[in-house]
């Protein structure tokens, strides 16, 4: 009997950008008596059903976008006589779907780290429960990933999570509802151990797979102080101090290491934090800009973000402190107008963001937006291929619309075309080359161009992926670009790299002292 863990994908590129962390965490949660699990990441290559034997246990992790392929795999595995278990955010939100459509024997809701061993034991004794509540475990229970199982040459970046959960409540995001608003932050020791292991293997680029790397803002601290809420203030200070501790320790790692994370724009108001990020070699961050107008920010409950000239200034602040921004923008908000697209492109250019993504507003399950949309659609259900549009992930990919919400003034096609045009301009060779001006060496500049092109190819999903011929052409392109990219990210392994000195509680973290 063998355990297989499968990360489903409709398209395989041969090479992938970031390791799907859950595969390596669940591998760590697999007790030794089951042997090393077989890890299949379909973004690299498709599952071979013949590898699954009767009596095996197949764990499939799904998010909304790959749920349909996950269900296909579940049915194949069940037909071959395996026990089928689903997990991941989509299975957490729709456990019945995995049973009805994916051949599931069991579904794990929430975090898999602790409950997985029990699921395996039950499956091997033939008594799996339909649903397991993995819940939201404490950060001290998060398992370090089994990086000894990673095919080093297949990924450009490895992923290490340092904090789960986000205190904000953006309307389009499910994180605060599924992972919770209380930041669950891992101790720096375990994070550093994983990163050192990865550098030993030859990974020098690490994505910090966090929902929000900046869970405590200066405003939070000042509010708690103003309210004389000592307990809250101390809690917040402790979280903040731990962040600085982690960053201080990251800065002791080999200088060639580069980290990337996701962060809210408020970090721009906190120069000490940005400087600590820079010292820690956290050179890039995805910043959720969402909209360049105050009306747009209101649409998504993100009024804590800046807009207009302040926005440009805040984004530039990151760069001044040596943190390069991947700006994330949403199009199709109710308040968007044709001129919003140009205004956004202008802000992205003026703010000197290194990379940008322009996504079309899509209601994701578990979000405030989705619930509102589902209620609205209940009165006039639209079906495609017999499937209600509110279950869009079940619609065959080629038939899926690109925009789900009727915009008050623009047609879906107009929003799509204008979005695509912003992608095309931002990632035209001319603009990429101009953006790369800050890079000194020619080799690194060419790398920037290549990475920009591959990023656009993999993530500009507005219209290029409308039929299967186009999908496969697009995948072909990305595959072609990915090979040289892979070489650029590779580093000689450092098998003898030592762990930095253990962190003493008394070690001064100068930055923290300035916060009151
Ligand atoms: C890092 C990250 C990325 C990275 C890297 C992705 C990668 N290759 O790993 C990047 C930036 C590329 C990315 C891109 C996108 N992402 Co993302 N991403 C994340 C993030 C912040 C962390 C993921 C992670 O590594 N977590 C750590 C692992 C250990 O946790 P986990 O995956 O949840 O797994 C645990 C449990 O779910 C469970 N589990 C998972 N699978 C299984 C399977 C079994 C069998 C079992 C038992 C248990 C189990 O056990 C695991 C351990 O506890 C999550 C948010 C989050 N908190 O998860 C969003 C998240 C997954 N992303 C999301 C989205 C929407 C996207 C994009 C579509 C964004 C966009 N518009 O382009 C793209 C899609 C890319 C794609 N096609 O996959 C959404 C998904 C929502 C949904 N309903 O599907 C999330 C939840 C964030 C959000 N805003 O709501 N993402
Ligand atoms: S979008 Fe970002 S800031 Fe908003 S709730 Fe989600 S993780 Fe937090």
Image (tube, rainbow, N blue to C red):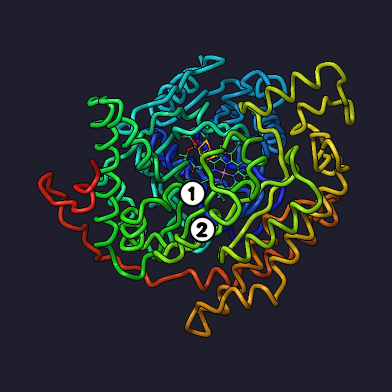
Q: Is mark 2 within 8 Å of ligand 2?
A: no
> Is disc 1 placed on a helix, strand or loop?
helix
Give me the disc on residue 265. 1
Q: Secondary structure at mark 2?
A: helix
Instruction: Please tell me whether residue 202 is drawn above or below residue 234 in the rendered image.
Output: below
Q: Quadrant of the C terminus?
A: top left
Q: Quadrant of residue 473?
A: bottom right
Q: CA distance from mark 1 to mark 2?
A: 8 Å
The percent position of residue 127, horizontal first and vertical second, equals 51, 14
Q: Which residue is disc 2 drawn over?
A: 315
The answer to whether mark 1 and mark 2 are in CB contact below 8 A is yes
Considering depth in this image, is 234 or 490 the residue closer to the camera? 234
Residue 446 in view = yes
Name the N-terminal-most of marks 1 and 2.
Answer: 1
In the image, taking residue 57 as reference, residue 454 lies left or right, namely right
Can residue 32 be seen in the rendering of this structure? no
Residue drawn where x is 58% and y is 79% of the image: 446
- Please say if 456 is above or below 124: below
Which x, y percent locates residue 346?
68, 62
Quadrant housing residue 204: bottom left
Q: Residue at x 56, y 25 (%)?
A: 92
Residue 156 x/y as whole percent: 51, 62
């Amino acid at each position: 009997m063998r355990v297989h863990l499968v990360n489903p994908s409709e398209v395989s590129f041969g090479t992938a950008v970031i390791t799907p962390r859950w595969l390596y965490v669940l591998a760590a949660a697999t007790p030794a008596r089951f042997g090393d699990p077989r890890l299949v990441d379909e973004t690299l290559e498709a599952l071979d059903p013949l590898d699954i034997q009767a009596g095996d246990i197949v764990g499939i992790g799904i998010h909304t976008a790959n749920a349909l392929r996950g269900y296909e795999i579940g049915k194949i595995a069940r037909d071959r006589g395996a026990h089928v278990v689903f997990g991941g955010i989509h299975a957490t939100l729709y456990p019945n779907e995995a049973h009805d459509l994916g051949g599931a024997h069991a579904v794990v809701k929430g975090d898999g780290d602790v409950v997985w061993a029990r699921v395996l034991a039950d499956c091997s004794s033939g008594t799996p429960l339909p649903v397991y509540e993995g819940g939201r475990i404490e950060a001290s229970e998060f398992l370090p990933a089994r990086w000894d199982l990673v095919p080093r040459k297949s990924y450009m970046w490895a992923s290490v999570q340092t904090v789960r959960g986000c205190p904000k409540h953006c309307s389009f995001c499910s994180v605060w509802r599924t992972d919770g608003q209380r930041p669950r932050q891992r101790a720096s020791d375990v994070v550093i151990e994983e990163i050192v292991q990865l550098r030993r293997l030859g990974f020098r680029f690490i994505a910090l797979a966090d929902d929000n790397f900046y869970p405590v803002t200066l405003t939070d601290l000042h509010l708690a102080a103003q309210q004389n809420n000592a307990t809250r203030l101390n809690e917040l200070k402790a979280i903040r101090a731990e962040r600085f501790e982690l960053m201080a320790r990251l800065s002791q790692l080999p200088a060639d290491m580069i980290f990337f994370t996701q962060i809210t724009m408020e970090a721009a108001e906190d120069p000490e934090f940005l400087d600590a990020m820079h010292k820690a070699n956290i050179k890039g961050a995805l910043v959720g800009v969402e909209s360049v107008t105050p009306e747009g920010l209101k649409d998504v409950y993100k009024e804590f973000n800046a807009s207009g000239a302040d926005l440009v200034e805040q984004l530039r602040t990151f760069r001044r402190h040596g943190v390069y921004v991947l700006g994330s923008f949403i199009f199709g908000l109710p308040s968007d107008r044709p001129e919003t697209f140009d205004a956004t492109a202008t802000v992205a250019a003026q703010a000197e963001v290194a990379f940008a993504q322009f996504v079309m507003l899509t209601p994701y399950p578990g979000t405030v937006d989705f619930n509102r949309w589902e209620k609205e659609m209940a009165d006039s259900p639209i079906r495609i291929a017999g499937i209600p549009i509110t279950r869009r992930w079940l619609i065959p990919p080629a038939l899926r619309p690109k925009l789900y919400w009727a915009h008050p003034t623009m047609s879906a096609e107009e929003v799509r075309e204008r979005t695509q045009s912003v992608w095309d301009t931002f990632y035209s060779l001319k603009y990429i080359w101009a953006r790369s001006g800050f890079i000194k060496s020619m080799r690194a500049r060419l790398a920037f161009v290549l990475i920009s092109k591959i990023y656009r190819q993999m993530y500009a999903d507005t219209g290029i992926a409308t039929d299967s011929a186009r999908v496969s052409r697009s995948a072909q392109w990305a595959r072609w670009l990915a090979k040289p990219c892979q070489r650029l990210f590779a580093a000689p392994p450092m098998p003898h790299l030592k762990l930095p000195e253990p962190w003493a509680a008394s070690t001064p973290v100068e930055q923290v002292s300035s916060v009151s």
